Image (cartoon, rainbow, N blue to C red):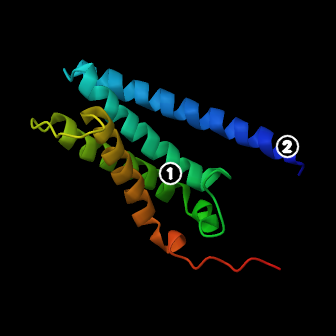
């Protein structure tokens, strides 16, 4: 495969992942606002969920996250992968909602919204990695000379 083909595929995957995150984030914001969550609180929660799921999908299906350690993840059953993706989103939602909606404002030099986003994304993607630790904890293969 030529370098141009690889860049084309990479750009294609970035577009697909961006669309996935955009649609998922918009749906979550809409749902949260429908139950009375203010937009300033709903947005970082939704973004954390969308990014966590997009990162998890990238590790399974795209060359963006897949490497020698994670090649076997895509061989898992589709139902098991779906559970992994949903769980990543649920953990991201729970962690970010606890910070955002918990009532107590957490002071951060980064700003509360960014803190909520970072903690939620880290927790969600971390949950995905934890569920698939047998792939992430593999020894890195030695490069061929």
Identify the residue shown where x is 35% and y is 33%: 46
In-image side of 17 versus 93 (left or right):
right
Q: Which residue is label 2 attached to?
A: 5
Identify the residue shown where x is 59% and y is 65%: 70
In-image side of 58 versus 142 (left or right):
left
Q: Which residue is label 1 attached to?
A: 56
Q: Residue 21: which numbered mark, if any?
A: none
Q: Is the residue 132 above or below the residue 128 in the image?
A: below
State the image coordinates of residue 60 (x, y, percent, origin top left): 59, 55
State the image coordinates of residue 30 (x, y, percent, origin top left): 34, 21
In space, the residues marked 1 and 2 are separated at their CA atoms by 24 Å
Farthest-out residue, front: 109
State the SS at label 2: helix
First-in-chain label (1 vs 2): 2
State the image coordinates of residue 8 (x, y, percent, origin top left): 79, 38
Return the residue nearer the eye: 118 or 76: 118
Return the residue nearer the eye: 135 or 83: 135
Q: Are marks 1 and 2 in contact (CB under 8 Å)?
A: no
Q: Quadrant of residue 14?
A: top right
Mark 1 vs mark 2: give the one in front. 2
């Amino acid at each position: 495969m030529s370098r141009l083909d690889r860049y084309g595929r990479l750009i294609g995957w970035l577009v697909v992942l961006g669309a996935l995150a955009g649609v998922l984030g918009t749906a979550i914001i809409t749902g949260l606002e429908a139950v009375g969550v203010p937009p300033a609180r709903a947005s970082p929660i939704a973004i954390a969920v969308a990014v966590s799921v997009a990162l998890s999908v990238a590790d399974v299906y795209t060359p963006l996250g897949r490497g020698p350690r994670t090649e076997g993840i895509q061989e898992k059953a589709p139902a098991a992968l779906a559970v992994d993706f949903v769980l990543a989103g649920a953990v991201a939602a729970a962690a970010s909602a606890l910070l955002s909606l918990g009532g107590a404002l957490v002071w951060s030099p980064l700003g509360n919204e960014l803190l909520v986003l970072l903690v939620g994304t880290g927790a969600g993607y971390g949950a995905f990695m934890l569920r698939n630790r047998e792939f992430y904890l593999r020894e890195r293969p030695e490069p061929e000379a």
